[in-house]
Image (spheres, rainbow, N blue to C red):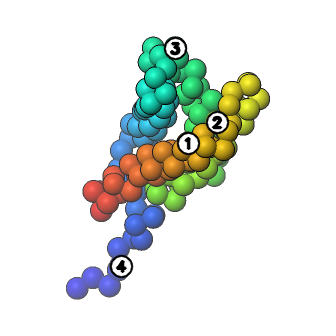
Amino acid sequence: MSTTSPLPHSTRLVRLPAAAIAAIDVVCIVAFAAIGRGNHGESLGLAAILGVATPFLIGLAAAWAVTYASKHAAPRTIRQGVLVWIVTLAGGMSVRSMSGGGTAVAFVIVSAIFLSLTLIGWRAVAARRSA
């Protein structure tokens, strides 16, 4: 009988290579931009989607830099996913604001919800599966 308890769900590791974790994060942001543009009946061309996604991709790069600076590793836990979400959202909104992009309250709320569900959510699913 083992006396060790399982790791709390928030600290379980996602067992994927760093490049795969980064790629999934990028897909979440590009999907966010594409879905948003589609819901507003706007162009779904690559340049148009990247125009919306780029500020958040810059925020994501900052989030990864913060994670690597503090942990010297890819953000593999749900807890680190929360950090990725916060920095990505704040960084993305800051870059949008500085570049003349919209930061209406409704957009910030929708962005926060979608990015939390995706950037944290996929880590929760992956951590649970690897437990």
Which part of the image, by quadrant, shows the N terminus? bottom left
**Regarding mark 1 in the picture, which secondary structure is present there?**
helix
Residue that badge 1 annotates: 111
User: Farthest residue toward the left?
Assistant: 1
Res 92 label: 2
**Regarding mark 3 in the picture, which secondary structure is present there?**
helix
- Give the residue at x 27% y 56%: 129
Identity, as a three-letter code, of the amino acid under mark 1: Ser
Which circle, 1 or 4, is nearer the viewer?
A: 1
**Regarding mark 2 in the picture, which secondary structure is present there?**
helix
The Cα atoms of the two marked residues, 1 and 4, are separated by 36 Å
In the image, residue 2 lies at what x, y percent?
Answer: 27, 82
**Regarding mark 4 in the picture, which secondary structure is present there?**
loop
Within 10 angstroms of label 1, few (less than 14), some, or many (20 or more) residues?
many
State yes or no: discs 3 and 4 in contact (Cβ < 8 Å): no
Identity, as a three-letter code, of the amino acid under mark 2: Gly
Q: Is residue 91 above or below residue 46?
A: below
The Cα atoms of the two marked residues, 2 and 3, are separated by 17 Å
Res 47 label: 3
The Cα atoms of the two marked residues, 3 and 1, are separated by 20 Å
Res 5 label: 4
Which circle, 1 or 2, is nearer the viewer?
A: 1
The disc, 2 or 3, on the residue closer to the chain's N-terminal end is 3
- Tell me which corner region of the image, top left, top right, bottom left or bottom right, holds residue 56: top right
In the image, residue 115 lies at what x, y percent?
Answer: 50, 44
Q: Is residue 53 left or right of residue 46?
A: right
- Give the residue at x 49% y 20%: 42
